[in-house]
Image (cartoon, grey):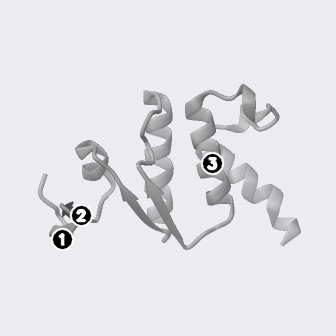
Amino acid sequence: PRRERGPRIAEALGLLGLEEVSRRRHKGLSGGEAQRLALARVIASHAEILLLDEPTASVDAESRDRILAALAALSQSGTTVIFSSHEPALIDSLAQRVILFDRGGIASDIEGNHEK
């Protein structure tokens, strides 16, 4: 609904530390800011499921930390977050279930306390 747009957008921007860039043109954003802004758009939609491909790839440490915190908060609030990653630290910090693929097939599927 139209009346919810402003608060949803403000919440998503705040979650990703983008309040100060909300009035800048997209061309003036850094790569990390642009990636966080794309995620904020999805968060503002209140999607029940997020499917992300390498959500922290090619971003600086600050952007990575903000993205991780936002994804953890979304997961805690009941949003299902599905992501691909080659980063063991990202997987260890967020994943509740890990499915490892090898040569196009499932090599392992571990729920709960996954192996590190």
**How far, Cα to Cα, is label 1 from label 2?**
6 Å
At 28% from the left edge and 52% from the top edge, which residue is drawn? 91
Residue nearest the viewer, comparing 52 with 77: 52
**How far, Cα to Cα, is label 2 from label 3?**
25 Å
**Three-letter amino acid code at disc 3?**
Ala
Q: Quick one: label 2, few (<14), some, or many (20+) residues within 10 Å?
A: many
When asked about the image quadrant of residue 37, the answer is top right
Q: Helix, strand or loop at disc 2?
A: strand
Q: Which residue is mark 1?
A: 109
**Three-letter amino acid code at disc 1?**
Asp
Q: Which residue is mark 2?
A: 98
* Residue 72 in the image: above or below residue 107: above
Mark number displayed over residue 93: none
- 20 lies left or right of 34: right
State the image coordinates of residue 12 (x, y, percent, origin top left): 66, 52
**How far, Cα to Cα, is label 3 from label 1?**
29 Å
Q: Helix, strand or loop at disc 1?
A: strand
At 79% from the left edge and 31% from the top edge, which residue is drawn? 24
- 23 lies left or right of 54: right
Answer with mark 3 or mark 1, whichever residue precedes in sequence. Answer: 3
State the image coordinates of residue 69 (x, y, percent, origin top left): 46, 46
At 63% from the left edge and 37% from the top edge, which residue is drawn? 34
State the image coordinates of residue 71 (x, y, percent, origin top left): 47, 54
Mark number displayed over residue 38: 3
Answer with mark 2 or mark 3, whichever residue precedes in sequence. Answer: 3
State the image coordinates of residue 56 (x, y, percent, origin top left): 43, 42
* Residue 23 in the image: above or below residue 46: above
**Three-letter amino acid code at disc 2?**
Val
At 16% from the left edge and 62% from the top edge, which residue is drawn? 114
- 26 lies left or right of 98: right
